Image (tube, helix red, strand yellow):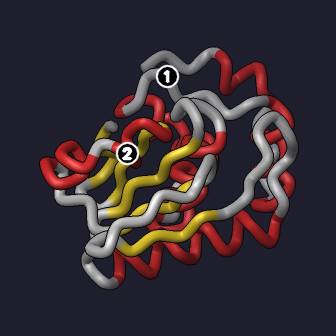
Amino acid sequence: MDEIRPWLFIGNFKDTLNKPGLRRNSIQAMLQLAEKVEYADIHSLYLPVEDFAPLRFDLLRQGVSYIREQKKANLRTLVACGVGINRSSAFCTAALKEEEGLSLFDAFKEVKRKHPEALPHEPVWNSLCTFYGEATPYVEVLQIQP
């Protein structure tokens, strides 16, 4: 689990099961994109986002809205998918873009800097570009160094 911002963390499914790790990072909310894990003291939202496929825009909107609502409520949120590479990095990138007004490319560079294994798959990246009306070729994403 890595901190992207004090309000935004990225991780994988195992991180959602690590209650001591969640406590250590003061995680109060989770956006789960792999499997649903529930705790009485952590607010959570599970979205059935398919791996390796373009993002469904309704799920992207719902997930990013959830992250931003948690930030507004001063809750530290973990965004987790199966292995913490593709789906979670896409949602964190979108949240940074919307919350901080960054370009999609600059938002992803921030995610990559804090979580070096981050790399949305090409169909996921292309769907983000379509959703936000930006046209950064995937080859440029592949060249980003942490």
Q: Is residue 90 above or below residue 6?
A: above
Given the image, on which type of amino acid does mark 1 rest? Glu
User: Element under label 1?
Assistant: loop
Q: Is 25 rendered above or below residue 99?
A: above
Camera-nearest residue between 119 and 35 = 35
For disc 1, the marked residue is 117
The residue drawn where x is 26% and y is 60% is: 27
- Residue at figure coordinates x 43%, y 65% from the top left: 38
Residue 85 place in picture, x, y as percent: 57, 30
Packing grade of label 2 (10 A; few <14, some 14-19, many >=20) is few
Residue 103 pos. (x, y %): 60, 52
Can you say which quadrant of the picture contains the N terminus?
top left
Q: Nearer the viewer, residue 18 or 83?
A: 18
70 left or right of 137 in image: left
Considering the numbered disc 2 on the image, is that residue within a helix, a strand or a loop?
A: helix
Amino acid type, label 2: Leu
Tell us which disc is closer to us: 2 or 1.
2
Q: Is residue 70 left or right of residue 130?
A: left
